[in-house]
Image: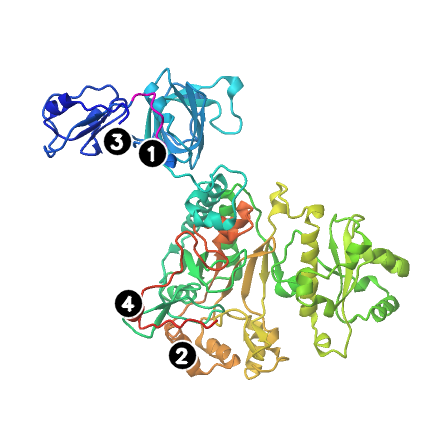
Amino acid sequence: MGDLKRTPTVGAQIGLTNAVVDMGHRLFWGGCRSPEFSEPGRKIPTGPPPSLPVAWIVTVYNLPFSSPPYDPRKGHKTLLDFLGDLRRTHMCSALRSSDAGKKTVLMGWVGRRRDLGSLIFIDLRDRTGVTQVVVNRELNPSAHGKAEALRNEYVIAVVGTVKQREPATFNRNIPTGEVELVVDELRILNESKQPPFLPGETVLPNEEMRLKYRYIDLRRDAMQFNIQMRHKVSKAIRDYLCAQGFLDIETPFMTRSTPEGARDYLVPSRVQPGSFYALPQSPQMFKQILMISGFDKYFQIVRCFRDEDFRADRQAEFTQIDLEMSYPQLDTVYTVVEGFLTAAFKAAGHEIQTPFLRMTYDEAIRLYGNDKPDMRLPAMVDVREAFLAEELEEFTTKFRIRKELPLQLIRISKAGDISGTERRTIGTQGAYQHVGGPNFVQLMTDPKRFAKDYPAASERVLQFAKVEPDDLWLLAGALNKPEIAAVADQNLQHFCEKCGYLRLDLAQKYAEKHGAFKKSGDVAKDFRFLWVTDFPMFAWEKDEKRWHPAHHPFTSLHEEDMPKLEAHLDSVSDPKSPLGEIRALAYDVVLNGTELGSGSIRIHRQDIQRKIFQALGMSDEEARARFGFFLEALEYGTPPHGGIALGLDRIVMILAGAESLREVIPFPKTARAVDLMVDAPTPVSDAQLRDLGIQVRKQKD
């Protein structure tokens, strides 16, 4: 019992009603705090007691201030306060020198506690920042006694007076560093177990630990910054589109399964046994139907779902900025997208320049080797023009290079000279090696040997490609081996794509030297936007040996390419068909080598849609079975329309400088599609499965 004392006189005064009293801190009636007696030292009334059962026993707990603080981490229980009618007056980052002398109420988490005996300093934290709180035993012994019980991540409310700090004690690292709050009243609103890691720790635990305790991880400054930035960016985009006359319209999450390139997440129907809904990979057909319905301008910041393998920039659940408009020209779409991206980047503190550079798909492949070029790195240069005819003949013969394909000079600015050993290992690893580059591409990686063997050509080549003295460069040509069918069949696109992989491998390997990926503070250099246009309408699928739509089958084509389509409707199985030359009215917006979004002008005429299906080898019956409701909608006066969808997660990831989407999504999945915090997915009961008419078969080992 220690120094706990029973006081029967109190029981006599209040008629044997149960009261638990902490004489220095708080009074409980029937196990609950009574606000009438919350003030330390307040006298117990002698009037009528509260209306409570009378058969209870009265006990007064007299806890002197010298008692050790309660600590739940040692098996003790801290006596907690109610918030009552206390209202916060300021956030923890708001106080400044001009607020000195003001009575203030702050609430938040204990970030750090420093006990100096008569003074206890507390770093009080909320989502906006930190304020230093001071509890002085001489001024307020009651609050000081309670402050001794505080530990990291306790939730507290403090009432006090703002005080200007002495200049020598200013903390220049935080906005509130010139002031502190001297506590008059302290309320402990909740306690905390010892966290597995603290939000303020500079060394992070592994990602699995962070995702399991995501609610603690999200308290970290970096995560608070990322999620708040996500909010600002979303709001800026929404505000811009609303101001442009777009309507924010929701579309269904539970819809029908349609082929869109990835696996659907399926939802079984209990009331329609054997039938399934699909979670949408995008609202593609619904947004087109909204144009048919006359809404003219639609947008939505919407969750989408794709059951596909994960990468650093992919998640099963993702958020996209989806929009569609009627009667658009390509420039109309570009202007709208550039407008809301300008607003989004301004919300994050960056003033980007518009209009964005535009480049056709063919140009992107030829100059950069991929359809989402990173413009921070130099383009590849075909240097055949720098050779005399006889020099080129000799060079291509000696190195077994096809002279009808480009001789690409690949350079990495400011990477400097490298050792002979490093040069010999170029192309032996990374993505270039993974795609079989060495089997198709011949490299010349020794500039000194090239200058010795071809002195005149060497000078012209370097001048033609604008190579600087401290650049790393090499030559790449298409290997000439007619005896190997796969090598002989290599075309311009395949060759340039392999060179593009090598270009990116070298840029990543020597990133510290060239510094192109580091933020310079120059927005024009740090954020290189690009529109890639005129994508191919059809792509050849080697495994199936037929042409497939390179995008979704409702993408329109250039009007001037229509005769080519009509002349080759029955060539779906011919790999040399001119179908591969038809250009789509499709476009991507790219930033620093990342595809932010993709869109197209849609087919709105039934006759053209029918021809596209015919070119894909799809019968009317098959088309009706797969897209019946949508094809029927096209029969009722469909206006020309087009749109685009951009990944919000990717935009925020780039703005935050994060390496993974998981850093900018509040509750992401792991690479194995697992939510570690809620432990999902999980098996369900047999009863639930029976309701759905589903039986689970376990895979054999």
The residues tagged by marks 4 and 1 sit, at their Cα atoms, a distance apart of 43 Å
Element type at marker 2?
Answer: helix
Residue that mark 1 sits on: 76
Q: Pointer 4: residues within 10 angstroms few (<14), some, or many (20+)?
A: few
Does the image show residue 226? yes
Residue that mark 4 sits on: 687
Closer to viewer: mark 4 or mark 1 = 1
- Along the line of sight, the residue nearer the viewer: 181 or 296: 181
Residue that mark 2 sits on: 624
Residue that mark 3 sits on: 85
Q: Residue at x 34, y 18 (%)?
A: 140
Closer to viewer: mark 3 or mark 2 = 3
Name the main secondary structure of what is drawn in magenta.
Answer: loop
Q: Amino acid at mark 3?
A: Asp
- x and y percent of residue 552 in the render? 49, 70
The residues tagged by marks 3 and 2 sit, at their Cα atoms, a distance apart of 63 Å
- x and y percent of residue 115 in the render? 44, 24
The residues tagged by marks 3 and 1 sit, at their Cα atoms, a distance apart of 28 Å
